[in-house]
Image (cartoon, helix red, strand yellow):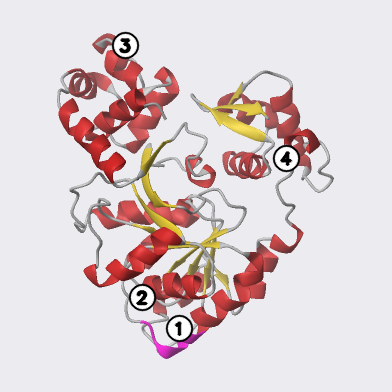
Amino acid sequence: MLQNELLHLIALSMVPNIGDVHTKTLLQHFTTAEKIFKARKTELEKIPGIGSVRASAIRNFRNFDRAEKEIKFLEKYKINAFGINDDSYPKRLVHCYDAPPLLYFRGNGQLNCSRILSIVGTREPTEYGRDWLKNLIQDLVPQGPVIISGLAYGIDTMAHKNALKNALPTIGVLAHGLDRIYPSANKSLAREMVEQGGLLTDFMSGTQPDAQNFPRRNRIVAGIADAIIVVETGNKGGSMITADIANSYNKDVFALPGRVNDNKSEGCNKLIKENKAQLVTAAEDIIALLNWENMPTREKKNQRFLFPDLSPEEKNILDLISKEESVFIDKIYQQSGLKTSDTAAAILKLELLNLVRTLPGKRYQLI
């Protein structure tokens, strides 16, 4: 991303009352953050959901010095910044309605690997949960997934540690800026993860791990993966929030069942009972339900038409995109006749197979 665009994206994230959904709407209309700040107030007011108050907030913003300071911080600590229109932005996340327009990443892991799993659970797991998670990650090694979690105590920490132990890349999603680690007891673990995965956040440096930040963190955990695995959890808490968010994104959710009188399994059992999660007992369940055994690997671009196992829906969308230099997402929705979630899933697979690329303004192009 060009530094000038990064400067304006950071600045846009600081404008009062301009959240993720509004930012995405503005970017779809103006294509760049710089153009948003240069737009007249009357232009901004015409954008759905912006109105006079938000338009004035954008026009009156002056704190570009803070954005410049953030860029210096990123450069000093070799932190990458991804805008939602960048090729390096997580493709699974871009289709979520409230995806963060800007992400900060420190590490060497890949955010667009063919297999990504998020693992969440209680901060105080039982021996049953700990042993099951250890065996699960060991059994997933041949599939080579990236393991995502939130670097919290308990299941999160165990997911990261077991991934490192089994030489799997693991990425921690943070509820604060990259100038600190919370909990501080995981500083050593975080350093290892930077070498074998990384740390990801949508919060600027200086942001404290305040309570309201964790649901925002959870939406990234839910959206960035192929599926979410809930190992142990009570009836309330962050894991249940993450599972609910994942369901709203039409993601696969798996839950480890437990005894009916065990409060650490109450949440998992509830998710299964209410058909909000698939019951999972072993790695084979996940591999089969995600069809990982039959998933084709990424091919070179000159082989893009040699995919006999693409679904009819995926072939239809590929054909639609191939007919024009670039196609807006709304046109794909309209002409494909598919549901929004099915269209997003099909486009994601085509992107992971290196068949199509995302362009600014929610346009897609054949590679």
Q: Which residue is mark 4?
A: 314
Q: Do the residues under discs 1 and 2 have CB atoms within 8 angstroms?
A: yes
Query: Looking at the image, is mark 3 or mark 2 earlier in the sequence?
Result: 3
Q: Which residue is mark 2?
A: 122
Q: Residue at x 38, y 48 (%)?
A: 105
Q: Is residue 272 above or below residue 40?
A: below
Q: Which quadrant holds the C terminus? A: top right
Query: Where are the magenta residues, as a range?
Result: 125-131
- Residue 153's disc number: none
State the residue in front, 85 or 210: 85
Q: Is residue 68 above or below residue 31?
A: below
Label 1 to label 2, Cα distance in Å?
Answer: 9 Å
Q: Which quadrant holds the N terminus? A: top left
Amino acid type at mark 1:
Gly
Query: Looking at the image, is mark 4 or mark 1 earlier in the sequence?
Result: 1
Q: Residues within 10 Å of mark 1 (few under 14, many from 20)?
A: many
- Residue 129's disc number: 1
Label 4 to label 1, Cα distance in Å?
Answer: 38 Å
Label 1 to label 3, Cα distance in Å?
Answer: 54 Å
Q: Judging from the image, what secondary structure is the residue with disc 2 in?
A: loop
Amino acid type at mark 4:
Glu
- Residue 171 in sight here: no
